[in-house]
Image (cartoon, grey):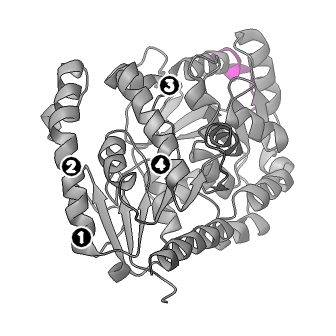
Amino acid sequence: MSDFPKLLVATEFPPNVPGGGGAIVRQMLKDWPVEKLFWWSCEPDKNRQYGQLVAAHAVAAIPPRLYPNKRGRVLKSWLLENGWRPWAARHFEKTVAAFQPDVIWMIPHLWSIPALAGVLLRRHFPFHFSIYDYPDTNPAINAFGPKRCRRWAGQTDQLYLHATTRDTISQQMTDDLRTRTGVNGMISRAGLEQEDFDYLSGKNETRNDSIRIAYAGTVISEKSFEIFVKALGRVRNQLPLPLTLDFFGDHSYRSRIWFDGAWMKEHGNQAGPELSRALKECTWGFLPMDITDDNPRYNRFSLPTKLVSYLAAGLPVISLGHPESTVVKMTSKYQVGLCATESNLEPLGKKLQTALSEPDPKTKFLPEIKRCASEEFDARRIRAALHENFRKCASIRR
């Protein structure tokens, strides 16, 4: 059998989507032959900025006007569930018949879940299952309704159970799924490549003329973000160097009440090496989760990919969140920067002032950054284990 079986990726998003899920999948597909790589999604590939090529891409497109957003969520969700979903399931079956993959890699994401579950739970086809976020987090429930999201969560559990091989993004998620399904899985997530480890081992100059805190990606935990910004605002004039908060991502936050253009800068979306270079010019990386436990299905199980981006750039991490969140547990285990759980501005401000007054934080926290990266986020090791699972699935089919 070839070292690279014919692989069909099946999920809601296209090959070159921004965001953490797309980043993980692309990194795990590094060096996978294009002629052996196929894709099925509910969204078209609108751009090629990330450079992910595939042999063929089948799209069971959700009409943009039907995708539930701020208007008509109930009606649009009903129409998708009863009209688009059965059509998409048939579309996926035809895609499998046309592409004849050796193995399917399913990543459950929102509307792809009911369409794919209807096929994969019924047909005896070997598939690998990777889950990065639960489908019944608060934002999804607000968009699509609690009953639908909980039904998707049940289908997700069944897919995890019936998969040939499987993985999750965190140990907490692995443990949680094992309690309901009785089966275990590996952990697969974005990681550092060899060039990243080489960078961390090199003698890298540190700029000491300003304090730059990077935030990469979309602001998910807005309440935590606002608390952080308010605490920073209280102490920034007491710091030894000028402070800036640098945003890297698709979204603009200038309209937010907490945004202050005097010391916050937006740099727009940057991909791959461009983002890596930009982050290396910063001093810290900021990683918030919800400070309360109101959204536990996200807070306790998901792990934002921006953590890997910060570690790869050698940035100490300022983490803020509920004590039971994955981020706080990870940054408590490894002393990679400042780990805070306070929502009160005064103690949080004092912690920030002390940390940000450190003259050379990159050097101080580098040993723990390297240890965390090596033990938890070695991309080569994670990718090799995942590819071995793909080969296992393919061997079963043959």
Secondary structure of the magenta portion, mostly?
helix
Q: Earlier in the sequence, mark 1 or mark 4?
A: 1
Q: Amino acid at mark 4?
A: Leu
The residue to which callout 4 is attached is 159
Badge number at residue 88: 2
The C terminus appears in which quarter of the rendering?
A: bottom left
Whether the residues at callouts 3 and 2 have beta carbons within 8 Å, the answer is no
Q: Secondary structure at mark 4?
A: helix
Q: Secondary structure at mark 3?
A: loop
Say left or right for 276 vs 203: left
Above or below, 322 relative to 355: above
* Image spot of residue 200 (x, y percent): 74, 63
Give, as a single range, the part of the protein colored magenta.
233-240
Q: Nearer the viewer, residue 363 or 101?
A: 101
Q: Earlier in the sequence, mark 3 or mark 2?
A: 2
Using the rendered image of the protein, determine whether residue 61 is visible from the camera's viewpoint: no
Q: Amino acid at mark 3?
A: Ala
Residue 261: say if magenta.
Answer: no
Badge number at residue 360: none
The residue to which callout 1 is attached is 97
* Image spot of residue 167 (x, y percent): 59, 55
Whole-angstrom CA distance, mark 1 to mark 3, is 57 Å
Q: Amino acid at mark 2?
A: Ala
Q: Secondary structure at mark 2?
A: helix
The residue to which callout 3 is attached is 262
